[in-house]
Image (spheres, helix red, strand yellow):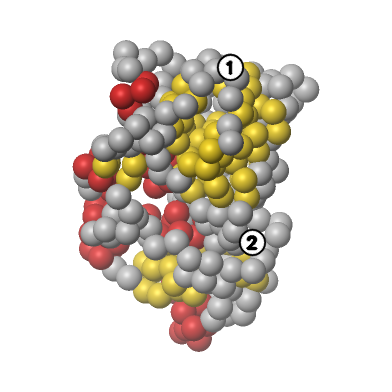
């Protein structure tokens, strides 16, 4: 068991997502930074889509009620187990009753605490992901589904010797296997299905302007502040299917980028979509202070970048030469 001592501003459980229910109006949910979730799971020898704890925007503290193996990934956070500082993307053996402190240390929004065996809460529509608006993904009273102080998180079984898995880490910054996280990134996009609903000046505005993330943003969508995008057609659409990464433009001209909990349909025209390889980068841009620019890509380039990003992630694991991370 893991016990929540101090939750972050937003602390939820997320796995690979709730697939197959969009036709019924249920979003996929899952992690805001899918690469970081997969990396954390791979380090602790879990399946890539196993359930982990998503920590958003601020520090958090947990305590291991039993010995376990954990790893932390993400941007803008650090990990401390007991009195020891642990590098990100590294597995560490945690003895019973040791505190696990996740500290907010810099720009970035999301961190992922994976535990070997995965967080083993009951499935809801085939997933353990928390969907806040529908109260899916956690058995909580009073309508609370975000994790709170005192919550106990069950851990799945393991057939491995945890000590033998301690000290594994991911080789970062090699062969484009990690996202290019930045507080001021250039995000690649492909044209959306309603790009013709915008003037050529409107499309050029999107590509030449700098945008920031509005504080009203959430796991459903990032609302962007910046230059309004001019529309050629101002009438609204009949609602149609929606996917993560779509950039909707309402009548005020300010884009909204759909995120993990995005609705399954929408009626605003979609000028473009953020490519999958850059969705983790966008998710980690600091709210308010980060500066975002967009550039056009192609479907072929987007597919290539995504395959490179995820290919052989498990092969990036470096085994420990000495017993550095087991206490």
Q: Residue furthest bottom?
A: 201
Give the crowd class for mark 1: few <14, some 14-19, many >=20 residues within 10 Å: some
Looking at the rendered structure, which numbered label has been put on residue 102?
none
Mark yes or no: residue 67 visible: yes
Quarter of the rendering containing residue 326: top left
Q: Residue at x 52, y 71 (%)?
A: 184
Apparent side of residue 305 relative to residue 114 in the rendered image (left or right): left
For label 2, the residue is 287
Residue 162 is situated, as x and y percent measured from the top left of the image, at 37, 21
Q: Residue at x 68, y 35 (%)?
A: 7
Q: Between label 1 and label 2, give the one nearer the viewer.
A: 1
Are the residues tagged 1 and 2 within 8 Å (C-beta)?
no
**Number of numbered discs:** 2
Residue 70 is situated, as x and y percent measured from the top left of the image, at 46, 30
The residue lying toward the viewer, choosing from 84 and 256, is: 84
Q: Residue at x 32, y 59 (%)?
A: 173
Residue 191 vertical position relative to residue 140 in the rendered view, above or below: below
Residue 4 vertical position relative to residue 109 in the rendered view, above or below: above
Secondary structure category for the residue under label 1: loop
For label 1, the residue is 65
In the rendered view of the protein, which quadrant contains the N terminus? top right
Q: Residue at x 44, y 56 (%)?
A: 279
Residue 65 is situated, as x and y percent measured from the top left of the image, at 58, 16
Q: CA distance from mark 1 to mark 2?
A: 34 Å
Give the crowd class for mark 2: few <14, some 14-19, many >=20 residues within 10 Å: many
Apparent side of residue 76 relative to residue 156 in the rendered image (left or right): right
Apparent side of residue 248 relative to residue 116 in the rendered image (left or right): right
Residue 187 is situated, as x and y percent measured from the top left of the image, at 43, 68
Question: Of callouts 1 and 2, which one flags the residue occurring earlier in the amino acid sequence?
Answer: 1
Secondary structure category for the residue under label 2: loop
């Amino acid at each position: 068991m893991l016990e929540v001592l101090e939750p972050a501003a937003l602390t939820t459980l997320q796995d690979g997502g709730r697939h197959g229910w969009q036709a019924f109006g249920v979003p996929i949910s899952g992690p805001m930074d899918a690469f970081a979730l997969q990396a954390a799971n791979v380090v602790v020898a879990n399946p890539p889509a196993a359930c982990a704890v998503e920590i958003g925007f601020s520090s958090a503290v947990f305590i291991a009620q039993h010995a376990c193996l954990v790893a932390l990934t993400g941007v803008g956070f650090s990990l401390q187990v007991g009195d020891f500082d642990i590098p990100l993307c590294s597995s560490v053996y945690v003895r019973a009753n040791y505190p696990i402190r996740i500290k907010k240390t810099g720009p970035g929004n999301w961190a992922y605490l994976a535990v070997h065996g995965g967080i083993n809460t009951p499935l809801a529509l085939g997933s353990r992901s928390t969907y806040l608006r529908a109260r899916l993904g956690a058995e909580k009273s009073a309508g609370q589904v975000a994790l709170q102080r005192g919550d106990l998180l069950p851990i799945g079984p393991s057939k491995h010797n945890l000590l033998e898995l301690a000290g594994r880490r991911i080789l970062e910054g090699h062969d484009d296997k990690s996202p290019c996280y930045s507080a001021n990134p250039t995000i690649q996009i492909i044209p959306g299905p309603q790009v013709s609903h915008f003037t050529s000046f409107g499309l050029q505005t999107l590509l030449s302007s700098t945008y920031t993330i509005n504080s009203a943003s959430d796991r459903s969508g990032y609302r962007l502040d910046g230059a309004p995008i001019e529309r050629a057609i101002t009438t609204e659409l009949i609602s149609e299917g929606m996917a993560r990464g779509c950039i909707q433009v309402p009548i005020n001209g300010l884009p909204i980028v759909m995120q993990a909990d995005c609705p399954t349909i929408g009626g605003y025209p979609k000028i473009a979509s953020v490519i999958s390889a850059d969705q983790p980068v966008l998710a980690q841009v600091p709210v308010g202070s980060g500066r975002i620019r967009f550039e056009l890509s192609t479907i072929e380039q987007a597919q290539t970048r995504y395959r490179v990003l995820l290919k052989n992630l498990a092969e990036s694991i470096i085994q420990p030469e000495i017993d550095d991370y087991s206490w």
